[in-house]
Image (tube, grey):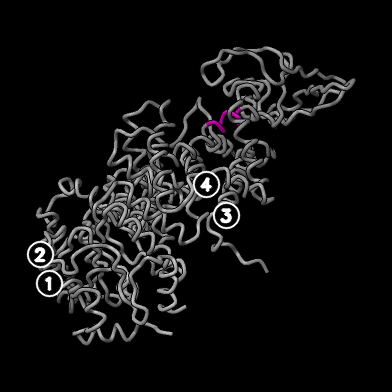
């Protein structure tokens, strides 16, 4: 199935989407400013660098650095979706992980609602764990195989809502399941009893459990079947509308990013080579790398 | 998961056999005071090196053949024709405390004094080998379990912490592990025994042995668990737990432990024999359980006499057979468990 068919599927599922028939235009059903600079950003990243030392020789001296993320700056306005595209190894995932402190940045600043979070200690970063969540790429590995759905969804609840009792948590977990299109009686099941798409829905429900403002979607659909991809993307869009979420959407598939994003960052070798609104990226790509990526989008 | 494991074991004949044997062994151990006709210290110098007594059926009731000592120097006993003593079941005898708490005096079977029933013969002071075997099992079979519990806990904590935190913590933990592994274990055993002995009473030797064996044993487990923890560390569900702000301690116990549980179970089953053997070896060298206590290793040590071979006192070597059966059974059960948990390691059948 090609990307074009995927978009047909998405269109089919969302007949109200404002789409041009001839081009694969981004979904523009929500009201936002297409340029992130116009509103006060939710997240500001400035000169972010993540370097890994390369050791060599007999004494294991540092011979050089791998520049996973090299001087990256961008803004994410509230309520928008910012797409981050690039090939494998371009540093997209590293940026995502830096934002949730899975990786410590080498240099640069990360500001969330104007507050510096990049250099906070583990303890001081804790309040932001409730605001920033992440959805992972691999739905088969992102859920603990030994935990039931109730335990999986109950874990974030018990961390951030310690006043909830067990029944409370179960009710909330059931509510979360129905929010992502699963049934409350799925609570007792284990991850291996679900399909890839269903697992990704559980992953989304887990991210939503803490009532976050900002979700980093780290290639949430690239491990899924194309037809399932469309339904997950629609779910993410519906949730955004419903809950007023902000997304940083990481992907290598430009077609999907274009569809879901207001604004697109194109990354190559740790640097952002182009950033523009989704429309502009599609209509008039400036950088040769962006052009190449666009050419790589499969067509019928 | 435990229920699933039991179901899988039940599907394999070898697993069922092993579980049954171990079940019987441990039941016998738990109820040894009830099953043994005598106390392990009950001597009868007139019946030294008595061979196993014959059980006859007289009027549909089991009777014990009465023997007469023919040659005390060669420990030769001849059955007395027609003289038998009935075996009484569930009758009361000398007082004992079941598991050290419940006072009781009922035993499964007994014969009237001064006659004696020696199912598996008697030793040099006329003590019943069968009773001593049962009491000795309390030490020999429990030491593996208690040892493995300490070892696996230590191994999980050290290995898990090393794998989770990585870096310097990992480096320090692994160098310590390598140090312990590098020292030959038998020398370490003997050295630790020598070092610790003065702080303990001879009666506490059981405790000392458990401590020594666990101190040596945790290193290997820690190293393997550390490797598995390193790979778990990068699994997205662990990252997700971190992103939601779960504490390191909880990640270790909620995410690592359940995912390592199957490995821990297999490793525990496979290393229990090592503890049984190590206890036997220590006791055999005279460094383990001391008289008047009893263990299989100690019984074997007491059978180290030329007499045993020249007079063919084979029943004194039965503790060796007991160790053999237990060790083999644990090993086979461990293999079965590993096949269930990790089918990739299964031997290809031709």
Same chain for mark 1 and mark 4? The answer is no
Distance between the alpha carbons at the discs numbered 3 and 4: 13 Å
Which chain does the residue under circle 4 lie in?
B
Q: Are marks 1 and 2 in contact (CB under 8 Å)?
A: yes
Which span of residues is magenta-colored?
Answer: B132-138
Q: Are marks 1 and 4 in contact (CB under 8 Å)?
A: no
**Of B212 and A103, the residue lying toward us:** A103
Label ID, residue A167:
none
B48 relative to A15 in the view: left or right: right
Q: Main secondary structure of the magenta part?
A: helix
Which chain does the residue under circle 1 lie in?
A
**Of A62 and B121, the residue lying toward us:** A62
* Residue under pointer 4: B269
Report helix, strand or loop for mark 3: helix
Q: Quadrant of residue B202?
A: top left
* Residue under pointer 3: B340
Which mark sits nearer the N-terminus, 3 or 4? 4
Which mark sits nearer the N-terminus, 1 or 2? 1
B303 relative to B219 in the view: left or right: right
Q: Quadrant of residue A11?
A: bottom left
* Residue under pointer 2: A108
Mark 1 residue crowding within 10 angstroms, few (<14) / some (14–19) / many (20+): some
Q: Is residue B189 above or below residue B45?
A: below
Distance between the alpha carbons at the discs numbered 3 and 1: 50 Å
Residue B134 falls within the magenta-colored stretch: yes
Residue A39 appears at what percent x and percent y?
12, 61
């Amino acid at each position: 199935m090609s990307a074009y068919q995927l978009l047909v599927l998405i269109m089919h599922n969302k007949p109200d989407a404002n789409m041009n028939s001839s081009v694969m235009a981004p979904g523009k059903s929500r009201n936002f400013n297409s340029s992130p600079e116009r509103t006060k950003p939710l997240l500001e990243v400035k000169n972010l660098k993540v370097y890994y030392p390369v050791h060599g020789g007999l004494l294991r001296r540092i011979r050089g650095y791998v520049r996973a993320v090299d001087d990256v700056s961008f803004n994410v306005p509230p309520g928008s979706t910012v797409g981050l595209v690039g090939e494998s190894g371009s540093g997209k995932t590293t940026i995502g992980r830096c934002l949730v402190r899975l990786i410590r940045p080498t240099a640069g600043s990360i500001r969330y609602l104007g507050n510096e979070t990049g250099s906070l200690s583990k303890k001081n970063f804790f309040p932001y764990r409730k605001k920033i969540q992440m959805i992972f790429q691999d739905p088969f590995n992102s859920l603990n195989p030994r935990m039931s759905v109730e335990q999986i969804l109950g874990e974030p609840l018990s961390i951030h809502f310690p006043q909830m009792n067990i029944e409370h948590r179960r009710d909330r977990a059931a509510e979360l399941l129905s929010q992502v299109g699963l049934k409350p009686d799925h609570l007792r099941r284990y991850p291996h009893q679900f399909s890839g798409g269903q697992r990704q829905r559980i992953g989304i429900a887990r991210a939503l459990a803490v009532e976050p403002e900002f979700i980093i979607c780290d290639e949430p659909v690239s491990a899924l079947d194309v037809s399932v991809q469309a339904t997950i993307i629609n779910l993410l869009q519906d949730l955004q509308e419903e809950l007023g979420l902000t997304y940083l959407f990481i992907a290598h598939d430009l077609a999907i990013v274009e569809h879901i994003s207001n604004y697109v960052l194109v990354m190559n070798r740790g640097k952002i080579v182009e950033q523009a609104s989704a429309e502009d990226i599609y209509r008039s790509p400036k950088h040769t790398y962006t052009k190449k990526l666009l050419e790589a989008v499969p067509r019928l | 998961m435990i229920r699933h494991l039991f179901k899988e074991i039940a599907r394999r004949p070898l697993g069922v056999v092993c579980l049954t044997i171990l079940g019987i062994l441990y039941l016998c151990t738990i109820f040894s005071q009830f099953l043994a006709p005598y106390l392990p210290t009950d001597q009868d110098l007139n019946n030294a090196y008595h061979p196993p007594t014959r059980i006859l059926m007289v009027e549909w009731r089991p009777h014990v053949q009465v023997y007469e000592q023919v040659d005390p120097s060669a420990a030769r006993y001849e059955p007395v024709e027609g003289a038998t003593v009935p075996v009484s079941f569930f009758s009361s005898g000398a007082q004992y405390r079941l598991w050290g708490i419940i006072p009781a005096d009922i035993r499964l079977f007994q014969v009237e004094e001064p006659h004696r029933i020696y199912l598996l013969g008697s030793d040099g002071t006329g003590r019943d080998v069968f009773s001593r075997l049962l009491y000795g099992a309390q030490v020999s079979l429990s030491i593996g379990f208690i040892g493995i519990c300490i070892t696996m806990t230590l191994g999980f904590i050290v290995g898990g912490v090393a794998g989770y935190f990585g870096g310097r913590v990992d480096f320090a933990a692994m160098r310590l592990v390598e140090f312990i592994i590098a020292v030959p274990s038998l020398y370490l055993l003997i050295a630790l025994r020598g070092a610790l002995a003065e702080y303990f009473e001879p009666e506490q030797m059981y405790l000392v042995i458990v401590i020594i064996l666990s101190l040596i044993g945790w290193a290997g487990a820690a190293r393997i668990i550390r490797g598995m923890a390193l790979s778990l560390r990068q699994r997205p569900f662990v990252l997700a737990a971190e992103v939601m702000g779960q504490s390191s301690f909880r990640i270790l116990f909620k995410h690592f432990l359940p995912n390592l549980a199957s490995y821990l179970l297999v490793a525990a089953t496979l290393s229990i024999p090592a503890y049984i053997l190590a206890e036997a070896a220590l006791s055999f060298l005279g460094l383990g359980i001391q008289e008047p206590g009893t263990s299989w290793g100690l019984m074997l040590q007491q059978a180290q006499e030329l007499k045993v071979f020249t007079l063919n006192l084979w029943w004194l070597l039965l503790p060796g057979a007991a160790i053999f059966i237990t060790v083999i059974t644990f090993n086979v059960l461990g293999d079965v468990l590993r096949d269930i948990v990790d089918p990739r390691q299964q031997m290809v059948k031709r």
